[in-house]
Image (tube, helix red, strand yellow):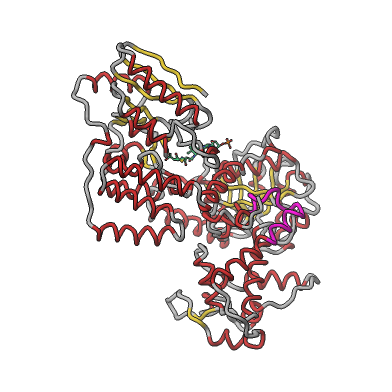
Amino acid sequence: MTVTIDRAGDIAFVTVDNPPVNALSQAIRQALWDAAEALDRDASIRAVILLCAGRTFIAGADVSEFGKPPQPPHLPDVVARIEAAQKPWIAAIHGAALGGGFELAMGCRFRLALDTASVGLPEVTLGIIPGASGTTRTPRLAGVEAAVDLVTTGKPVKAPKALTLGLIDAVVTGDLREAARAFAAQALSLPLPPPVSARPIATKDSAWWDEQRKAIAKRAKGEVAPLHALDCLRAATDLPFAEAMAKERATFLALRASDQAAALRHIFFAERAAPRPASLKDVPPLPLTRAAVIGGGTMGAGIVAALREAGLPVTLIERDAEALSRGLSTLSGIFDAAVARGKLTPEQAQARIAGVTGSTDYATLADTDLVIEAVFEDLAVKRAVFAELGRHCRADALLATNTSYLDPRRIAEGLPNPARFIGLHFFSPAHVMKLLEIVPTPETAPETLATGFALARLLGKIPVQAGICEGFIGNRILKRYRAEAEALLRQGTPIAAVDAAMRAHGFAMGPFEAQDLGGLDIAFLQREGARAAGQHVPETLGDLLVRAGRKGQKTGGGWYDYTPGNRSPQPSAATAALLAPHVTAGEALSPEAIATRLTGAMAAEGRAILAEGVALRPADIDLVKVHGYGYPRWRGGPMFGSGVR
Ligand code: T1G
């Protein structure tokens, strides 16, 4: 970790070097303060350029310091010191200037950035707000409306847009150091602009702020930081700079110590640890240059889209020409939807499709590195696929099953070189959902496992290793969650009360409306399959509904009734009649008690999963629930929420 000063004529270069992302640790803050003092005393210097070594400009305060008392010099003071420097400082940005990094840049008199760089204030994603003038300087650079968007969403903007907004003064290409030196020379030949804190800021009327508050509250779904950020932005327009800074600091310190911030930091670090497990540090993954997917249904097409997004050429195999045509059409639909949303240009969508080869002949897989099976959830069908793959693929080709519920060991029986076999459980839609459960069998080689994690990194997924049990980690906890929700029904809690309680807890929807959306028959078929295989699977209330033809929205009714063309759930007299014999009147539970009961059941199943070694650590279970099942991120997941670390 260093902050070095070098000089070229009357320009000084202050370079921060604190791998991996130049986070603003206490030592860096102190060194920057000292550099400002030293360069103010150096009469030969007329301007100072702030640069960073490594892959990025300063990515923010050091999040690992957040659990400890803040140490001076505090960042807002360092930013103010640089702003008050006798010589103008110029921030030269590459990579990403985020959080405190961009706040430091706003303390500089000028900011310039490489065209590939981005700037942002992501603090609300950590349950806090900018704590070093993000809510007071940003509106003075970009205006109040842009500042509200940047600060309350936490979304970064690329350099060209930052220039348009006024967040930076120039976009440069090529050698950043040289471009910054030339910019400084030119800036020194002109009158300097005022320090950012002295620049004017517009005010907005109360109606505008009320409108913003309503929109942000709807989007935040229980997270409080965005609303506090809005309050501080409003204070910045109504109060003198120093008073607004005091409000921002007090709010930042209070949120920094909050449960939501602790939970979001927990997920932040868990997400970054997941793709690189220490146990695989010295295990080289196999090369992945060509992939294939077997099955072009919803899952298979989604997986093809994810592989194409990562730039891999893909062969899509289907059982016959008609199924293949349907699969390719599903895939085109995915890319067309991305174009319609502005995520892809038509040319990019064309290139995605051009990288897909459709075939019904397994012999075309002779030189494929990775094959992912995503056919019907039936053991015989899957085993027939792997028999073909065993015959046609290279012995070292990685063969993966996307099964959700079947035992991967059963699927791989008889497969030549089972060391190259693994479970890769994607979540639908596979090109959107980040979670990937990686399920090795006892015969899976370490290199195969390492390749599974390398694939997750390539696809930008959050990988979690799971042991073999019914439903692995996520679906096993889902089954327990649903069973506990049905137990509440049996004890007299209304269906709508359970769903409302879980929505209030931060879920996008409750367990019953979610089943109606996905279809009750999916889990019903799993239970029937297990029963047919001789397992004792008690009847559930969901079974009653499916046997009565109530499979959810797709049949016009499940737990709720639905009128044609209207997806909003209506209490159902038919369901009440079906369940009546199984319901005993009980005490009405509060929404908090319902949520505690259901999240407690998830945590209990998580503890059993840990005890059995199906999950390697509590944080992995939290990642599964947050990224696969809509568990509110700002609660940290069922294990964090229950105190299991
Ligand atoms: N503090 C400490 N460590 C950090 C860090 C941070 N801010 N950001 C990343 N790391 C670590 C991360 O844990 C991982 O460690 C390694 O760097 C690479 O990260 C006052 C108070 C910058 C876009 O929220 O968005 O400033 O696992 O895998 O994919 O108002 O990291 O290697 O040991 O993510 O190339 C605001 C968070 C802080 C930025 C790079 N800043 N970081 O992505 O690498 S609050 C943020 C990111 C703040 C001020 C407030 C990304 C990245 P390890 P990575 P990447």
In this rendering, is residue 8 above or below 532? Answer: above
Give the camera-side residue of 214 and 92. 214
Relative to 571, 417 lies left or right = right
In this rendering, is residue 111 above or below 533? Answer: above
Q: Main secondary structure of the magenta part?
A: helix
614 part of magenta stretch: yes
Residue at left 63%, top 59%? 319
Give the camera-side residue of 8 and 535. 8
Give the camera-side residue of 77 and 427. 77
Percent position of residue 222, x then y: 46, 60
Residue at left 39%, top 38%? 132
294 part of magenta stretch: no
Q: In which quarter of the image is residue 539?
A: bottom right
Give the camera-side residue of 438 and 629. 629
Percent position of residue 220, x then y: 43, 58
Q: Provide the residue span drawn in magenta.
A: 604-621
Relative to 287, 242 lies left or right = left
Percent position of residue 530, x then y: 75, 69
